[in-house]
């Protein structure tokens, strides 16, 4: 495991991390494309101690995963900027989690269906009046004609950092340094 430089910001509370991963809407999948990184934003769900996402069965992301399934999945949320009268001593309130490991294709239809249902429940709660059926997931094709593939990342390493927002220091439009001296 790599050391986090600012140890005072490390979060080790598994419950807080799990809640953060469950509610955050966008994650960033980092893959390797030869010598260059390739990072793509994704919708995802956190369930069964794993990140799940889906995508088309063909394309650059799929090619890179097949060439090297090792990845980094990052989720972060910005809660605002905190100010200080000392020039350039501003700070950002945030939470971030980085998950490392190897991606796996979900081949079990029941697991894939549960993941797709969890994604609907997260992103459009209550919109559909029926649960997804395995046959729908099995037969579904995108508007471009591609079959959908579900991936799973069971992290082999996880790091989390947070810097909580101090409301007394929170920047807001119209706040000027003279108000803080």
Image: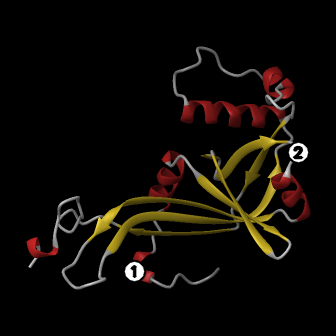
Q: Residue at x 9, y 71 (%)?
A: 179
Report which residue position mark 1 lands on: 8
Residue 150: image location, x then y, percent: 78, 42
Looking at the rendered structure, which numbered label has been put on residue 113? none
Q: Is residue 160 left or right of residue 140?
A: left
Answer yes or no: do the residues labelled 1 and 2 have beta carbons within 8 Å? no
Q: Nearer the viewer, mark 1 or mark 2?
A: 2
The count of marks equals 2
Neighbour tally class for label 2: few under 14, some 14-19, many 20 plus, Cα within 10 Å: few
Question: Residue most toward the top?
Answer: 129
Identify whether 142 is placed above or below 158: above
Q: Residue at x 86, y 34 (%)?
A: 147
Neighbour tally class for label 1: few under 14, some 14-19, many 20 plus, Cα within 10 Å: few
Residue 56: image location, x then y, percent: 81, 41
Residue 153: image location, x then y, percent: 73, 56
Of label 1 and label 2, which has the lower sequence position?
1
Identify whether 48 is placed above or below 89: above
Residue 42: image location, x then y, percent: 65, 49
For mark 1, give the secondary structure.
Answer: helix
| Front-most of residues 90 and 174 | 174
Q: Is residue 47 left or right of residue 60?
A: left
Label 1 and label 2: CA atoms lie apart by 43 Å
Q: Residue at x 16, y 75 (%)?
A: 177
Identify whether 121 is placed above or below 52: above
Q: Is residue 1 left or right of residue 126?
A: right
Report which residue position mark 2 lands on: 58
Image quadrant occupied by the C terminus: bottom left
Identify whether 73 is placed above or below 47: below
């Amino acid at each position: 495991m790599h050391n986090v430089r600012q140890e005072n910001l490390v979060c080790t509370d598994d419950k807080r991390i799990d809640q953060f991963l469950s509610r955050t809407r966008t994650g960033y999948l980092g893959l390797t494309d030869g010598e260059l990184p390739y990072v793509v934003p994704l919708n995802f769900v956190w369930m069964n101690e794993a990140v799940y996402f889906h995508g088309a069965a063909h394309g650059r992301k799929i090619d890179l995963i097949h060439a090297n399934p090792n990845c980094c999945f990052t989720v972060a949320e910005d809660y605002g900027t905190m100010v200080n009268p000392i020039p350039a001593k501003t700070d950002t309130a945030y939470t971030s989690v980085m998950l490392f490991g190897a991606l796996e294709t979900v081949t079990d239809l029941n697991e894939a269906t549960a993941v797709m249902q969890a994604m609907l429940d997260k992103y459009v709660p209550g919109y559909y009046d029926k649960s997804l059926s395995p046959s729908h997931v099995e037969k579904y094709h995108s508007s471009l004609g591609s079959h959908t593939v579900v991936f799973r990342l069971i992290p082999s390493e996880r790091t989390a950092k947070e810097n909580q927002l101090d409301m007394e220091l929170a920047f807001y439009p119209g706040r000027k340094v003279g108000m803080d001296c």
